[in-house]
Image: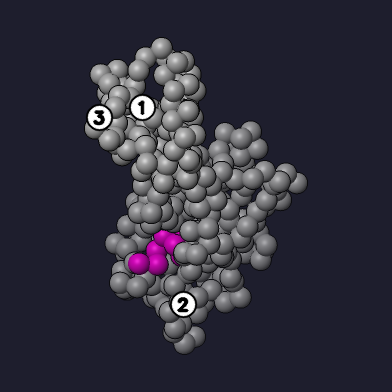
C-alpha cells in the first residue's frame, strides 16, 4: 500500500478539501488528485465523491479515514517516543553504588532527577566496591558510584571525582573530648562503638593506628548497623570514627560533637565510574550532569575548641 497516498488522503479527509490539503502540503491540486486516483485504483475502492462544488468521502472512504487516523496517531507516538528517548526523557538507568553514597547521597539525587525525568526507570543496587566494579566491567550497570578510599581502577574505567568526604571522630556532647583537640594516642584510649569487622571505616581506623604506630582502639561494642552504633554514641557511650555525611546533621543539631585529632585528616573519595570510550545513553548522561550540578559538599567545619 502506498503510504504517501494514504497520507494525502488523510489530510483531505481531515480538512474536507483538496484545495486546503494542497495548501498545507504545498503540493499542486492536480498532483494530489492524480495520487488519490492511483490510490483508489490500488485499493479498488472509491474514496472520494463529488458533492456540490467540493468533495465528500464515500462509505469506504469514511472507514479508511478512521483507520488512517489511528495509523498516523501511532506514527506520531513513535516519533515522540524516539525524540523523548534521544533526549533522555524515557529509558532506563542501571546503577551500582557502595554503602555511603547509596544511603546518604543517591536518594536526594534521584528525587531531584525524577522531578524532571519521571518516566526514566531506575534500577539501583547497593553493594561493595569490588562487586560494583565487577558489575560495571561486565556491563550489568551503566554507572557505578563509589564512596571510599581512592582505588586503582582498570584502564577501561573512567573515574570522575565529585568531592572528598571527611572522616570524623565524634562523641556525645557531654564527653570530655567534645570539641577539643587531642592526640591520636589519647583518642585511642577511649572505647569505640563501631560496625562489624570488615566495615570500611573500621578498617580505616585500624590502618590509621598502624600508620602512626599507635595502639589500636578497644571496641567493646559493635553493631551490624551504622545507625545503631551512632545512636549508642549519642546516648553517651564511647566514640565513633565515621563519614561526615552520616553525622553532619547530628553535629549541626548538637546531638554529637567532633573531636579534633591533631595531625589527622582522612577522607573518602566520592566518585562516578563509567566505562571508558563507551557513549552513555541519554538518561544516564542526564543523571551524571545533574549530579555534577548538584554534588553534595561537606558542611563547613565547625570552629574547633581551643586545645587544652
- Name the mark nearer the viewer: 2 or 3: 3
Label 3, residues with CA under 10 Å away: few <14, some 14-19, many ≥20 = few
Q: Which mark is residue 51?
A: 3
Which residue sits at x=32%, y=57%? 231
Q: Which mark is residue 279?
A: none
Which residue sits at x=44%, y=23%? 37
Q: Secondary structure at mark 1?
A: helix
Question: Would residue 235 be found to the left or right of residue 281 on screen?
Answer: left
* Residue 65 drawn above or below residue 188: above
Q: Which mark is residue 68?
A: 1
- Name the mark nearer the viewer: 1 or 2: 1
For the question of whether residue 192 can be seen, the reply is no
* Residue 130 drawn above or below residue 273: above
Residue 109 lies in magenta, yes or no?
A: no
Q: How many marks?
A: 3
For the magenta stretch, what is the residue range? 240-249
* Residue 169 drawn above or below residue 41: below
Q: Which residue is mark 2?
A: 301
Mark earlier in primary sequence (1, 2) = 1
Q: Nearer the viewer, residue 257 or 102?
A: 102
Mark earlier in primary sequence (2, 3) = 3
Structural distance between the alpha carbons of marks 1 and 3? 22 Å
Structural distance between the alpha carbons of marks 1 and 2? 66 Å
Residue 11 sits in which quadrant?
Answer: top left
Amino acid at each position: 500500500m502506498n503510504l504517501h497516498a494514504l497520507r494525502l488522503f488523510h489530510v483531505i479527509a481531515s480538512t474536507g478539501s483538496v484545495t486546503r490539503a494542497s495548501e498545507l502540503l504545498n503540493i499542486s491540486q492536480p498532483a494530489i488528485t492524480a495520487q488519490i486516483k492511483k490510490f483508489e485504483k490500488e485499493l479498488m475502492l472509491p474514496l472520494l465523491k463529488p458533492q456540490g462544488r467540493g468533495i465528500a468521502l464515500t462509505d469506504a472512504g469514511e472507514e479508511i479515514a478512521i483507520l488512517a487516523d489511528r495509523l498516523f496517531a501511532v506514527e506520531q507516538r513513535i516519533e515522540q517516543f524516539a525524540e523523548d528517548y534521544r533526549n533522555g526523557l524515557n529509558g532506563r538507568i542501571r546503577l551500582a553504588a557502595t554503602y555511603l553514597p547509596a544511603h546518604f547521597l543517591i536518594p536526594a539525587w534521584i528525587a531531584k532527577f525524577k522531578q524532571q525525568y519521571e518516566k526514566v526507570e531506575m534500577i539501583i543496587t547497593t553493594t561493595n566496591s569490588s562487586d560494583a566494579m565487577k558489575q560495571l566491567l561486565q556491563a550489568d550497570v551503566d554507572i557505578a558510584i563509589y564512596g571510599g578510599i581512592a582505588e586503582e581502577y582498570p584502564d577501561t574505567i573512567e573515574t570522575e571525582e565529585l568531592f572528598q568526604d571527611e572522616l570524623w571522630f565524634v562523641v556525645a556532647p557531654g564527653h570530655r573530648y567534645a570539641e577539643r583537640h587531642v592526640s591520636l594516642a589519647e583518642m585511642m584510649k577511649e572505647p569505640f562503638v563501631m560496625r562489624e569487622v570488615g566495615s570500611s571505616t573500621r578498617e580505616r581506623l585500624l590502618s590509621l593506628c598502624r600508620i602512626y604506630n599507635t595502639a589500636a582502639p578497644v571496641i567493646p561494642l559493635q553493631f551490624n548497623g551504622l545507625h545503631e552504633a551512632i545512636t549508642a554514641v549519642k546516648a553517651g557511650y564511647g566514640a565513633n570514627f565515621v563519614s561526615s555525611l552520616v553525622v553532619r546533621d547530628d553535629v549541626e543539631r548538637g546531638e554529637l560533637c567532633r573531636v579534633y585529632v591533631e595531625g589527622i585528616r582522612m577522607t573518602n573519595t566520592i566518585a562516578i565510574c563509567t566505562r571508558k570510550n563507551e557513549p552513555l545513553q541519554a538518561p544516564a548522561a542526564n543523571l551524571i550532569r545533574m549530579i555534577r550540578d548538584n554534588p553534595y559538599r561537606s558542611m563547613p567545619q565547625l570552629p574547633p575548641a581551643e586545645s587544652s
